[in-house]
Amino acid sequence: MNLESAISRIRKSFGKLDAAYGRPVFDEIAIVGLEGASLKLHFYGGPREADFMNEFADSSISLRKELTSDQTSLGGEFSFTREGDGLGMDAYICLGPEVYLFCNNTAKSMHEVTQDPAWLNAQGEFLNASQFFSVDPLKLNI
């Protein structure tokens, strides 16, 4: 899958996620590629575009421990953290080799999101979104 197709797939899948939850689950999403020792922002949707990459190290700290070497990083893997709140990233989906979708609800923590009974219906849509990338991973032309 190319970047344009991945963004379209994410928007469609997250539209279903939001519909199942009854309101937006994540108001901030970013596709970030790992290029050696550096990071590259390939897509951003949210309220703090100008500051996102400058704040990324701090806002992703609770999820970074999940990105371990025992993961294949091929696509479709995901994780949530209950420690993220405010500007702290709440979830990620591995979109393909060395590229991730980071998701955040800037108003609520994942703990608060998952306490809502509507999350039971919505969580399946998040899983569905991740599975598209296990079958057809994002391949970036760097």
Image (spheres, helix red, strand yellow):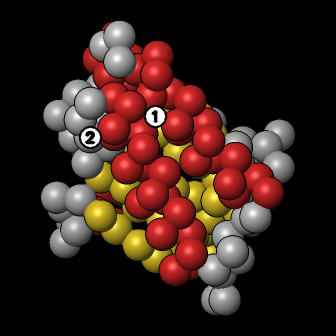
Judge depth for marks 1 and 2 and give the one in front.
2
Residue 35's place in the image compared with 95, above or below, is: below
**Figure quadrant of the N terminus:** bottom right
Q: Amino acid at mark 2?
A: Pro
Can you give x and y, in whole percent of width and height, for residue 35 in the image?
A: 63, 75
Q: Secondary structure at mark 1?
A: helix
Q: Nearer the viewer, residue 136 or 96?
A: 136
**Numbered tag placed on residue 24 in the rendering:** 2
Q: Amino acid at mark 1?
A: Ser
Quadrant hosting residue 18: top left
**Figure quadrant of the C terminus:** bottom right
Q: Secondary structure at mark 2?
A: loop
Can you give x and y, in whole percent of width and height, for residue 13 in the image?
A: 49, 51
Do we see residue 83 in this rendering? no
Residue 60's place in the image compared with 54, above or below, is: above
Residue 124's place in the image compared with 120, above or below, is: below
Residue 92's place in the image compared with 46, above or below, is: above
Instruction: Say few, some or many: other residues with alpha carbon within 10 Å of mark 2 (under 14 / 14 to 19 / 20 or more).
Output: some
Residue ID at (52%, 80%): 4
Residue ID at (68%, 54%): 132
The residue to which callout 1 is attached is 62
